[in-house]
Image (cartoon, rainbow, N blue to C red):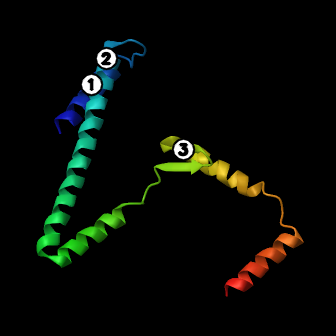
Amino acid sequence: MKDVMNMKSAYNVWKRAGRPRGESSLLIEKKCAKRALRSSVWQAIAKKDYELKQKIIESRKYDSRTFHKLVNSKRNKQGRFITDLYVGNQRYQEDNILCGFMIIFKLLGDRPPMTSSTMYLMKSRILNTN
């Protein structure tokens, strides 16, 4: 909570000073406050994750129902967000993921149409798997 208040006050001071750019001490102070806030948020997330893992380990020893409930909740929380995307040898992350998806769909659209021989091979493979 302290970091949030520091960030808000640093932002308000910077805003009242006319939002200076460059080597302004107010801008540097605002950036440091933002960095501290982000750091504390990530630490809180890591702490919560660690506590959940410890709870899973403890419940595994004593209560299988709670153990499975916690494991399933952990599974459901993961995979909601795509953090990394690989297209060939290129890695896209965070803001660039959209560019990666655009490249994938462009590559899919640029594929040459299937010839009759390719269609025949695909149909024969499908029939052989059944």
In the figure, residue 3 lies in which quadrant?
A: top left
Instruction: Count residues near mark 3 (Cα–Cα under 10 Å), then give few for <14, some for 14-19, many for 20+.
Output: some
Mark sitting earlier along the chain (1/2): 1
Kind of residue at disc 2? Leu
N-term mark: 3 or 2: 2
When the figure is inspected, residue 43 is found, relative to residue 34, above or below; the finding is below
Which image quadrant is residue 128 in?
A: bottom right
Mark-to-mark CA distance, 3 and 2? 33 Å
- The mark found on residue 92 in the picture is 3
For disc 2, the neighbor class at 10 Å (few under 14, some 14 to 19, many from 20) is some
Asked if residue 118 can be seen in this view, the reply is: yes
| Secondary structure state at the residue bearing disc 1 | helix
Residue 26 is marked as 2
Q: Evaluate if marks 1 and 2 touch, with contact meaning CB atoms under 8 Å apart.
A: yes
Looking at numbered disc 1 in the image, what kind of residue is underneath it? Answer: Ala
CB of mark 3 within 8 Å of CB of mark 1? no
- Which residue is depicted at the point 83% across and 59% down? 112
Query: In 3D space, how far apart are the residues under numbered discs 1 and 2 (Cα atoms)?
Result: 7 Å
Task: Classify the position of the N terminus by image quarter.
Answer: top left
- The residue pinned by badge 1 equals 10
What separation in Å lies between label 3 and label 1 (alpha carbons)?
33 Å
Query: Where's the C terminus, which quadrant?
Result: bottom right
Q: Is residue 62 above or below residue 26?
A: below
Question: Residue at image x 72%, y 52%?
Answer: 107
What's the residue type where badge 3 is placed? Answer: Tyr
- Specify the farthest residue to the right: 116
At mark 2, the secondary structure is helix
* Residue at disc 3, secondary structure: strand
Question: Residue at (27%, 69%) from the top-left corner?
Answer: 71
